Amino acid sequence: MANLDNKSNFGISELAAGIDNIVTELSVQAGDGARFPDPATKQYNCVLWNITDYGNPAKDPDKEIVRVTAKTTDTFTITRAQESTAASNHNTGGKTYSFALLLTAKMISDIETELDTKAAALSGTINEIAYFNSATTIASLAVATYPSLTELSYVKGVTSALQTQLGGKAATDQTMYIGTTAVAINRGSAALTLAGITLTTPDIGTPSAGVLTNATGLPTAGLVDAAVTLAKMANLAQDQFIGRVTASTGVPETATITAAARTVLDDTTVAAMVNTLGGASSTGTGGLVRATSPAITTPTGIVKGDVGLGNVDNTSNATERAAIATLTNKTLTDAKVTTTINAQTGTTYTLVLTDNSKLVTLGNASAITVTIPTNASVAFPIGCQIDFIQILAGKVTFGGAGVTINSKGSNKSIAAQWVGVSLIKTATDTWSLLGELIA
């Protein structure tokens, strides 16, 4: 398009030296001038901006668009203040100024003008076929030189193969209509084969010799009862039957018979089917009954209410409980309690529900803050206890918005390294901090 500015890919560089708001010449970095097109062919606009402070030229308050009118190696002759920008100083010390050939409003406006000009040059007539009457001009063909749209609609979708077949028939005793056009067909003594024809609500009578191939739209009411034999149905692969696989009502589909299902179908008696399904000899009558003392592997569907403690024999496994009992005034012989340790090494930690009854070790060289969440955030049970040990030099302090921490002297920090304290929940959002504490 002759009226568009010159262009190039990657036309960008930085000023070799700053310029004020008056000069009409600038230089870019050595060798970068080759990145820009020659303005002697067509001039073009470039953008100047402070790239040190503004990666995006749109954000530089002193951005400027200039027009390149000449170029000698790396030196450009420019016209200042283009496209509603102002001539600005681009010479602040310590700043780098970018000079780039970017897409501007002028370029888009020029493209729109060119397209509008091309569109205005197009001419033609509605519902006529267009053609090129020169290398760059489109016009309409005269109606007399081609079939009308109505005539073309008669043969829409007709293949060359069908045209050849119709052309080879003499117009004697048969008439066929394509659209509203009558086509004579000489059937003669040979069977007439029509391929690729779609019949819409046809009346085909009772054909005796013709072979109808790939025809659709046949009325099902016209099919004779019991006329379709198994041999005329689609071939089925082994281990398939006709049914419906997809959920919902619809046309028949093929379903695959699995090897296991086929084994059951091959059984000739109920007992044999039970043996196949159960995997052992059947006993009794009625539903599926397994043999005496069956082995049940990983059963599902049994809930704890289904099994009474009286039916549990635990004498063979001393490590599993057979019942739950409350110990009151009991003496435990050789009792052992193992404490779970939650090791924390950061400078902040917020308690979680699984810390209940655990020992939390706190180890960091810097100060550590332990936050107690509100009951609304983490519902620790009243009476729960969490133990803590400061294992490094970092001072540990307890706190939490919305909770009350009761402690001796209102001190909330562990006294020193290797000192342990306990935290006990005494009410909904109230805790007691016990141990050697400091402010």
Image (spheres, rainbow, N blue to C red):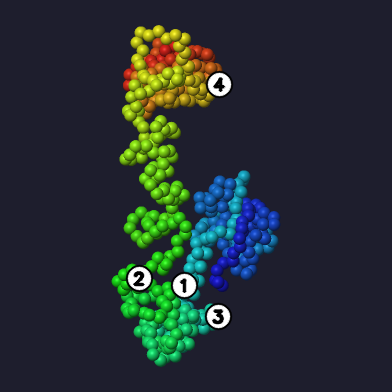
The answer to whether the residue labelled 3 contacts the one labelled 4, judged by CB atoms less than 8 Å apart, is no
Q: In front of the other: label 2 or label 4?
A: 2
Residue 159 visible to the viewer: yes
Q: In front of the other: label 1 or label 3?
A: 3
Query: How many neighbours does mark 1 have within 10 angstroms: few (below 14), some (14-19), or many (20 or more)?
Result: few
Of the image marks 2 and 4, the number of the one nearer the N terminus: 2
Of the image marks 1 and 3, the number of the one nearer the N terminus: 1
Residue 133: x, y in percent?
A: 52, 83
Name the element at disc 3. Answer: loop
- Kindly identify the amino acid type of the residue bearing the numbered disc 3: Ala
Of the image marks 1 and 2, the number of the one nearer the N terminus: 1
Name the residue beneath numbered marker 2.
Answer: 227
Name the residue beneath numbered marker 4.
Answer: 365
Query: Viewer-proximal residue, 345 or 272?
Result: 272
Name the residue beneath numbered marker 3.
Answer: 135
- Kindly identify the amino acid type of the residue bearing the numbered disc 2: Ala
Quadrant housing the C terminus: top left
In this view, 416 is above or below 167: above
What residue appears at the point 60 percent right and 53 percent down from the top-left corner? 98
Q: In front of the other: label 3 or label 2?
A: 2
- Kindly identify the amino acid type of the residue bearing the numbered disc 1: Asp
Separation of residues labelled 1 and 4 (CA atoms): 74 Å
Query: How many neighbours does mark 2 have within 10 angstroms: few (below 14), some (14-19), or many (20 or more)?
Result: few
Residue 399: x, y in percent?
A: 42, 21
Quadrant housing the N terminus: bottom right
What residue appears at the point 57 percent right and 67 percent down from the top-left corner? 5
